[in-house]
Image (cartoon, coloured by chain):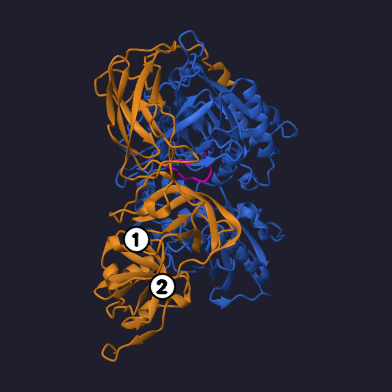
Amino acid sequence: MLVVLSILSGACVPMARDGQGADVAGQPVRLTFIHTSDIHSRLYDYDFTPSFTDNELGLQDGLGPYGGLAEMATIIKRERSMAGRTLHLDSGDCFQGAVVFNEFSGEAEFRGLSMLGLDGAVVANHEFDKGAANLATQGATWASFDLLAANYDFADSDLPYATELEDLVLPSTMYEMDGVRVGVIGLANISSLNSIYDQSNSMGIRVIEPGQAIPDEAAKLRAQGADIIVIVSHMGLDNDIEHARTYADIDIILGGHNHIALDPPLVVTNEATGKRIPVVHSGAFAKFVGRLDVVVQDGAVLSHSYELFPVDNTVPEDPDVAELLAEYSEQLDYELNLEQVIGYAETELTRYGTTGGDSMLGNLTAEAMRLYPGVETEIALTNTLGIRSDIPAGDITLDTLYNAMPFDNTITTMFLSGREVQELLDFNTERSTDRGCQSQAQVAGIRFTMNCADARAENILINGVPLDLDGTYELATNNYIAHGGSGFEVLERNTTQVDTTISIRDIVKSAISSARTLPQAGIAQEDGRILPVY
Amino acid sequence: MLALLLACSSVERNRIEPSFVHVDLATGSTLGTEAAPLPFSAVGSTFTATITTWNVDGEAYPFSGEMSLSVRPGRVSAPARITLVDGAWTGSVAVEAGFGPTRIWAADEDVTDGRSPSWSAGVSAPIWFQRPTIPEMQTTDNHESNQLEGEFAELRIGDREVVVSATDPAGFYVSDLGAAPGNFSGLYIYTFSKPPDEIVVGARLDELNGQNSEYLAATQLNFPTLHVVEGQRLSPSPAALITEAVACENNAMEAYEGSRVRVEAPVIPATFTADSTAFADYVAYGQWPLEVGACTVYAESTATVPDYYPPDHAGETLSHVEGMLKEVYGKWIFIVLDETDIGAGTRSRKGSP
């Protein structure tokens, strides 16, 4: 197994003829960074309708299915063959987002990425979605690449797997690229740690502030002879920009978390040194592979260029990776019959509303939650980001549903006062205001105006009747936000919670099967129940 | 750890020469400096460059064959490919739309002669160009493009009066007060989520960079890096009047894109009824038609003036409509900011039911 991996990976950093790096003093040297991020378990190609932005980035309509690790492997091998000094770094969140993760807990992702020849990856929030122990097990067993996070400290944790994680996850590492020593620092996500599926940060991680982690690791790497310092980050674009501005040792940032592709990359000028730092984000869901080329001379990055490669059906599968993935898909088909058709979508069913308010899939999900036999609450609310992708027009398969709803969340019911409902919707409005007035929650039994100008919910109707602040309402929600995920504290503190253990994906599957064809009147249609104004 | 088992520190590869490429600009050339840059030019400037090749031991290498030339940032207008003979090439390189520290790249790649390239590359010393102003970046005779489309644009802001002219939930507009309205002085900045708190109408910027794109043919900078001058407030330009002649010409309208604009006495067509295509577009996109003489522009107000239902006003002549101008492939849309932007309507006797 190990031999096979090492042969197929091509992960080795190019070295000079005798194993020593070339003498590059005074010479301009081209380095190539292959960059991937937020693959989110999209190991198999899948259908969706590319957005205008996807089109602009090169992912064209009509060339689906898109994504897939075997297709990415083809691009990566090709680009490696078209470069002298190559390093493949990934900005994390390769776990969670398709059924292969639900069933195999990240094994397929780590094996696949190892076969791609990935050199290093930052550990991101979704890598913990089946717990820290699972990450330790999967990493130790299957990852042939470095796992990096300079801002997580497991050493003080009483977590059973702390020792394994401490050994497994490196703060930084050095790659010798034929005479150029590239120090790479991992920066893991902090903000989402308390809102990942494995609740309440039970992993026992001690977080180290970037202001400490970056200079410390950079100094260590420079002392070891690093010519340049690369940050591989899952902290999000705003933090990446701030770090590029602030920390003098950084030369390049390869980031993720926001699911955006930046082509061309941003260029941020460091305030202390005047260095121009490329900040690269290369998209998500296996839709793109990024390639950053830099010319380095005597430790300075002189210039850069970037290309983003779309992963579509014009890219053939890499046979080795395809063969590996077939092992898993055969098991999935056998156990789950993923290709079973559960309904039909006459049009694409979208997870975001056209105006930023309620959405087709949001309304379908929230209604299914509150109406499900045994649940039957007055109102329902679920977080928009719990729905991860649109459902394309055509047959709706179980596989499609898993892609849209990968989280294994269940329905939690609870009683809220009218004031708490107001607080809940105010919180959603405030949170949505910060996100372009795109509603961060989807509802059933509720209509309201989401006033982003004042960050307040107004004109609230509960099943057609104005909200009674002194009234009591029974709510169905998901167990993730019921535990305070995404900052829903008003739910977290509620003491009437009952986790029904009913799977939300299962009840949505039932709703689709019952309706057979979607959308139809009152089902999976936008109806303006959340009206954004600003 | 598995990674250690797979370590490959002694792997060799067959080295293909040339290992290094040097790009030297002719001495005596005017290359500008950071303090005194060359003017921004969309039409091009020419520089004399010498490309040489070197082997892994740092010795001159007599490479003969093709190489590609490019410029970062900016464009190389000629030549894009060169042929080295005995390890050298000297010639003129024409550079367009460079800004900031601009370097000429020479790379051993994309060869057409069947050989295996080395993939090595070198870059020149920086040629310092001035960054473009907002009007310089946008001035073009193609309303669906601009001079820096596809670049990470770094704008000349510090010595200009560039002010926030409007905000929305996912971005904001700026205008360069040094250029009169109608001179490509307005620009939309897309921030993906709520703009930073200091971005308020009237705030002056002294740094503004971002990814330049034509979103549905509207010029915008995405994911900006910016800096607001603390404590300074300037008044944005008043709305510029769009005449019928301007409204009927895409490239004339383009010069106002991203600016606050006004039309007077526009008419909501009487044909804007529930069975019309325009109504279907309104339901789908929130845009409603306004006749300006013989031409049609559109307004969008659903989220900003939710109580105004345009179909109820079909057939009315409004005293005025104002808004921020954006384009969707030749469709010109006034983004209405508040209720004062929609003037009172009157219905002509002739048009009344």
Asked if marks 1 and 2 touch (Cβ < 8 Å), the reply is no
Segment tinted magenta in the rendering: A253-266
As drawn, the label of residue B322 is 2
As drawn, the label of residue A246 is none
Helix, strand or loop for disc 1? loop
Instruction: Report the side of A42 relative to A462 (left or right).
Output: left
The residue labelled by disc 1 is B255
Q: Tell me where residue B98 appears, x and y as whole percent.
A: 39, 40
Relative depth, front residue between A229 and A473: A229
Any magenta on residue A258? Answer: yes
* Observer able to see residue A339: yes
| B114 shown above or below B260 | above
1 and 2 marks on the same chain: yes
| A175 shown above or below A412 | above
Q: Tell me where residue B58 appears, x and y as whole percent.
A: 44, 12
| B66 shown above or below A422 | above
Q: Colour in which chain B is shown?
A: orange
| Badge 2: residue crowd in 10 Å (few <14, some 14–19, many ≥20) | many
How many discs appear? 2
The furthest residue to the top: A18
Q: Chain of mark 2?
A: B
Q: Chain of mark 1?
A: B
Any magenta on residue A311? Answer: no
Distance of label 1 from label 2 (alpha carbons):
16 Å
Q: What is the quadrant of the N terminus of chain B in the image?
A: top right
Relative depth, front residue between A298 and A4: A298
Instruction: Report the side of B307 relative to A519 (left or right).
Output: right
Q: Colour in which chain A is shown?
A: blue
